[in-house]
Amino acid sequence: MDNNEIRNANKKALPKFMVIMICCLVIGIVIGFCSVKFGSDSMAGGIRGAGEFFAANIAPWLLLAVAIILPVVCVPIYRNAKKLIVSWDGEDEETPDLIDKQHSIIIWITNIATILSYFLIVASYSKGFEVIESKGSILMFYASIAAFFAIMIETVIFQQKCVDATKKLNPEKTASVYDTRFQKKWMDSCDEAEKIMIGKCAYRSYTVTNTACVILSTVLAVCALVFRIGFLPSLVVCLIWIVNQSTYCIEAFKYSKAGNKIS
């Protein structure tokens, strides 16, 4: 691409970029004006009160609900996949795809449940030692801890079952889910088509994570001004953003060297 083509490409993309920047500027001005005009202290107090109510009265119950709902949802899916494995004649190509899809759904659900459980357990004891000192909250606090560990155990068991079932269909895959190097060993046992698929999924995840970090950092910057939430939420998002960007660049540097094989 010569210089003229580069300039034309930039000129074509610049108007859309400028429109987005102007819209963001207008939104920021409106939010700033409204916070000054109508006052942000009362709104911030209301949000803080809602957060405390959620932490004390909702988060522990949600954690217990996740611990109960997780096996209720995953067990039927796993049993259906197990039936398909037993009935598979070894020739039908659609059945293994359906089995893999159901195993992927289970792993997806368990991963989401794990992330939610981390958030909810933190929310449950976000008041600190006041929760333990309060007689009315101590029972729910310990119930939350029990539910958290139950979710962790359920997640490991379901994922182990899915991995073991996948190894029955693909004998070349030998990694155990309890191995600390499971992901690397699993990746090494994948064929080229699977590695390409993993690469495409990983790149899509990378781009979506970048977009999410941009949006979250912007929203949190506004919230820090309007609701005085401090800088720690923005710091966490920015750390994730830095790790995401740095990991991608380091891997790109490594594989761009001549003679390096992608594996």
Image: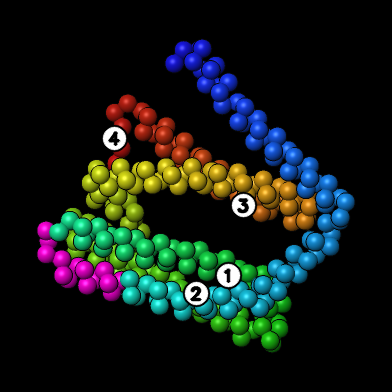
Give the mark nearest the N terminus, 4 or 1.
1
Evaluate if marks 2 and 4 touch, with contact meaning CB atoms under 8 Å apart.
no
Is the residue 9 above or below the residue 125 in the image? above
Q: Hey, what amino acid is under mark 2? A: Val
- The front one of 171 and 27 is 27
Q: Residues within 10 Å of mark 4 (few under 14, many from 20)?
A: few
Q: Nearer the viewer, mark 2 or mark 4?
A: 2
Q: Is residue 199 left or right of residue 53?
A: left
Q: Quadrant of residue 168?
A: bottom left
Task: For marks 2 and 3, give the CA distance.
Answer: 25 Å
Residue for point 46% across, 12% down: 2
Q: Nearer the viewer, mark 4 or mark 1?
A: 1
Q: Is residue 149 visible?
A: no
Q: Hey, what amino acid is under mark 3? A: Val
**Main secondary-structure element of the magenta-colored stretch:** helix
Evaluate if marks 1 and 2 touch, with contact meaning CB atoms under 8 Å apart.
yes
Give the mark nearest the N terminus, 1 or 2.
2
| Residue that badge 3 annotates | 236
- Quarter of the image with the N terminus is top left
| Residue that badge 1 annotates | 120
Q: Hey, what amino acid is under mark 1? A: Leu
| Residue that badge 2 annotates | 66
Residue range corresponding to the magenta coloring: 78-91
| Residue that badge 4 annotates | 261
Evaluate if marks 4 and 1 touch, with contact meaning CB atoms under 8 Å apart.
no
Task: For marks 4 and 1, give the CA distance.
Answer: 42 Å
